[in-house]
């Protein structure tokens, strides 16, 4: 194993499928969706959503009140699952708090708290004291809050590139570790539901009133969801234990074609995929499974499907997993990367939920049911508004001191 391998030490995920990665793992295996009919408070939009329970019960007392928001409640709840926070603490003790970095991805950050603030403006339009939260009403809020929660004072960054945000965190973290800037990086992503998101996507005529059906001939739009995911990364020769999975390659590009519509031929997405393959020193035939961005919008699925078929062949093993948790926006990149990693480790490849008839304009042999396959390399695509594209490849390491599934 080369010194430059970046390995995944541990990871966690919380989404509509339940708290912790164990809940996601079980839902994937049992093909149990976390989507529900829209019950977001005060929302009348007819749709299905991927909502995380218990966020409203988060207690914000004393100094914690300065951090109050739904997004931060999700971050705290997600980090309380599993042993990830404990592993971060071990590395902090080993290297020092300044040598452990945080890179978060988000699309909305804490827009939910901004919505509340507008309902409590004074007569002259000033924010009420409880909402004067400079570290919350801030695009960098997720990164700041994670560093605060875990007592880290190394470099901290929040990436806001729409739906590719928390895929790009792996690329940035790999560069920081390669450069020796830090000794470990906690990467993550978190996004929560709010009225701006629900109504914003509805205004674009992208929201479906039914459970989403990625790549299906009858698909008519997306379901929005919320979730948070995290992965702890280190250089392989310094990791005392890890999952046996490495970040093999990454690619990033920007179409700058249109604010919301993807490039018609997927030009930037192709470039990101080519970069990831080159970085991993792999060919298209080496990729055993592709977790597609697959939002269930008419344009996205058609363009991505045609591109992947052209590059990997119509028989490529690929699926969209948004039928489990919805489109979690800025958290989609990391959550779906963890789904791909789970497939790599468990050899259970998820199908595309709710798929009945593949769109004739999508030349891929997509499948609905899960499959059992031995995998060596997996890929995750994350394509966001404005043509912000990211592609990640994860591979088994030569030696795999695996943490038990």
Image: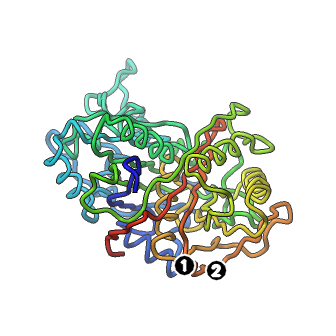
| Residue 79 vertical position relative to residue 135 in the rendered view, above or below | below
Seen as rendered, the residue at the extreme top is 124
> Is residue 276 rendered to the left or right of residue 364?
left
Question: Mark 1 and mark 2 in contact (Cβ < 8 Å)?
Answer: yes
Q: Position of residue 200 (x, y in %)?
A: 60, 42
Q: Which residue is mark 1?
A: 31
Q: Position of residue 93 (x, y in %)?
A: 13, 48
> Is residue 29 rendered to the left or right of residue 19?
right
Q: Position of residue 59 (x, y in %)?
A: 22, 52
Q: Residue at x 63, y 39 (%)?
A: 385
Q: Nearer the viewer, residue 314 or 127?
A: 314
Q: Nearer the viewer, residue 231 or 205?
A: 231
* Dot placed on the residue nearer the N-terminal end, 2 or 1: 1
Q: Position of residue 42 (x, y in %)?
A: 48, 52
Which of discs 2 and 1 lies nearer the camera? The answer is 2
Seen as rendered, the residue at the extreme front is 2
Considering the numbered disc 1 on the image, is that residue within a helix, a strand or a loop? loop
């Amino acid at each position: 194993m080369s010194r430059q391998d970046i390995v995944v030490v541990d990871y966690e995920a919380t989404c509509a499928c339940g708290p912790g990665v164990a809940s996601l793992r079980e839902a994937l295996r049992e093909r149990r969706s976390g989507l529900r009919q829209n019950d977001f408070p005060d929302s009348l939009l007819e749709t299905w959503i991927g909502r995380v329970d218990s966020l409203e019960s988060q207690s914000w007392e004393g100094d914690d009140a300065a951090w109050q928001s739904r997004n931060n409640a999700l971050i705290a709840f997600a980090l309380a699952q599993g042993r990830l926070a404990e592993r971060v603490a071990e590395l902090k003790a080993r290297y020092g708090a300044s040598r452990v970095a945080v890179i978060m991805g988000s699309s909305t950050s804490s827009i939910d708290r901004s919505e509340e603030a507008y309902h409590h403006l004074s007569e002259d339009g000033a924010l009420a004291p409880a909402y004067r939260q400079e570290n919350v009403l801030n695009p960098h809020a997720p990164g700041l809050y994670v560093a605060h929660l875990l007592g880290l004072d190394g470099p901290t960054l929040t990436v806001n590139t729409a739906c590719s945000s928390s895929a790009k965190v792996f690329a940035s973290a790999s560069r920081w570790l390669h450069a020796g800037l830090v000794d470990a990086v906690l990467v993550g992503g978190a996004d929560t539901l709010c009225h701006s998101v629900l109504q914003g996507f509805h205004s674009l005529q992208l929201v479906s009133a039914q459970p989403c059906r990625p790549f299906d001939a009858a698909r008519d739009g997306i379901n929005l969801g919320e979730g948070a995911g995290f992965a702890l990364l280190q250089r392989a020769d310094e990791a005392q234990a890890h999952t046996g999975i490495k970040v093999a390659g990454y690619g990033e590009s920007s179409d700058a074609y249109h604010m919301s519509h993807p490039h018609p031929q997927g030009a930037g997405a192709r470039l990101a995929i080519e970069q990831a393959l080159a970085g991993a020193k792999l060919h298209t035939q080496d990729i055993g499974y592709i977790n597609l961005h697959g939002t269930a919008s008419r344009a996205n699925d058609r363009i991505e499907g045609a591109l992947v078929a052209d590059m990997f062949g119509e028989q490529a093993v690929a699926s969209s997993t948004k039928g489990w948790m919805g489109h979690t926006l800025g958290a989609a990149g990391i959550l779906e990367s963890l789904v791909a990693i789970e497939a790599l480790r468990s050899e259970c490849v998820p199908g595309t939920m709710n798929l009945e008839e593949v769109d004739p304009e999508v030349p891929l042999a997509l499948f609905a049911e899960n499959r059992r396959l031995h995998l060596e390399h997996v890929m995750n695509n994350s394509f966001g508004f404005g043509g912000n594209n990211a592609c990640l490849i994860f591979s088994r390491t030569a030696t795999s001191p695996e943490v038990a599934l």
